[in-house]
Amino acid sequence: MIPMSEERLKQLRDRIDAIDDELLALLNQRAQLARDIGSLKNDGPIYRPEREAQILRRVLASNPGPLSGEAVAAIFRSVMSQCRALEKQLTVAFLGPLGTYSEEAALKQFGGLSSPVQCASIDEVFRAVESGQVDYGVVPVENSTEGAIGRTLDLLLAGTLSICGEVALPVHHNLLSRAVDKAALQRVYAHAQSLAQCHEWLNLNLPGVARQAVASNAEAARLAADDDRVAAIASRRAGELFGLGLLAENIEDDPRNTTRFLVLANHDVAPSGKDKTSLAMSARNVPGAVVQLLSPLAENGVSMTKLESRPSHTGMWEYVFFVDIEGHRSDAPVARALAQIEQKATFLKVLGSYPVAIP
């Protein structure tokens, strides 16, 4: 006689098998519908950030659990990625090598990368997208602890690309090494921002160990793989790629540490229903000019979520203001505000309207 527990286990497994068969059939039905839609696009963009954002918001709103929202979003992003690939294998550039947080952000946004392109610098990512060598690029723009990435802002200002999406990536730093004990360490490698984000932890736990900034955390992991006297601050994925052991995890000073990434494209994005618009503008050098420049936002009920100033590189003490506002540039209140700002500003550039990041 089969024990009751084994019989119940078999019943549950049979039910899972049946559900898997249903899932397989439904996934292929979805893929066929996606392919049919693709044939009607008339050479338009295959990747539609606004449509994918709408799908994710809908399924997250109706998710009953026990799967978390993050898990559901990851599953559906992967499904959409595979359906997209039936039309075309998208090429996505990011700050390499493999194992960087930029790669992690690209993987999150696109649900997997069939044709990843590793770049040596943020400049190279911009050039790859602008020249048409790749379809999209992913670059960091700001960190919740260390602030804006100035080089990204400068390139957005000077270039022709549009922002078509954003990714908010919680960043958890790990101390990785071939060494088995922190006492053996003589040097720690990491990107300068990561060193800053772990400054207090390093002061407390590795006070006598030298710190050296390198181009990326993945590069730090590569260096650590060659010397058991050094460690890297990097992601778990980087540790796996370079065969490093985990000496300490989550060593960032702020547990809420988050980096925001932008998705770059050569095309604009339609409204998704919950969007953000990024602007760059300059004011006349007269008293109250900045207040007057921003007043159309308040007058039209448009909320500003970010204000960042950068030297304009056109003259001493002249600045460009980078502004994020709620809404799409085609929304009536935003369109009115932009028209009024254009009359007041010495310079105005809409960097892109795009869906607000989904966890």
Image: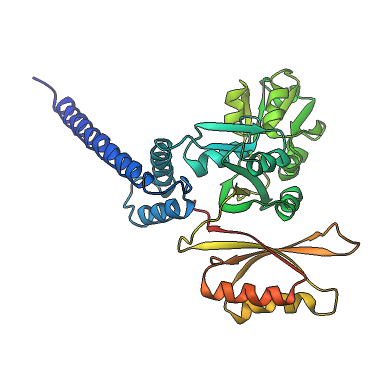
| Placement of the N terminus among the 4 image quadrants | top left
Reply above or below: 35 against 341: above
Is residue 170 visible in the rendered image? The answer is yes
Residue 259, x across and y down, in percent: 63, 48
Name the outermost residue toward the front: 42
Q: Is residue 196 left or right of residue 165?
A: right
Q: Is residue 181 left or right of residue 358?
A: right
Q: For the point 51% across and 37% down, which residue is it?
A: 90
Name the outermost residue toward the right: 316
Q: For the point 30% across and 40% down, which residue is it?
A: 32
Give the quadrant of residue 312: bottom right
Q: Is residue 246 left or right of residue 206?
A: left
Residue 138, x across and y down, in percent: 61, 43
Reply above or below: 97 against 173: above
Reply above or below: 106 against 176: below
Residue 348, x across and y down, in percent: 71, 66
Reply above or below: 88 against 266: above
Q: Report the front residue among 75 and 27.
A: 27
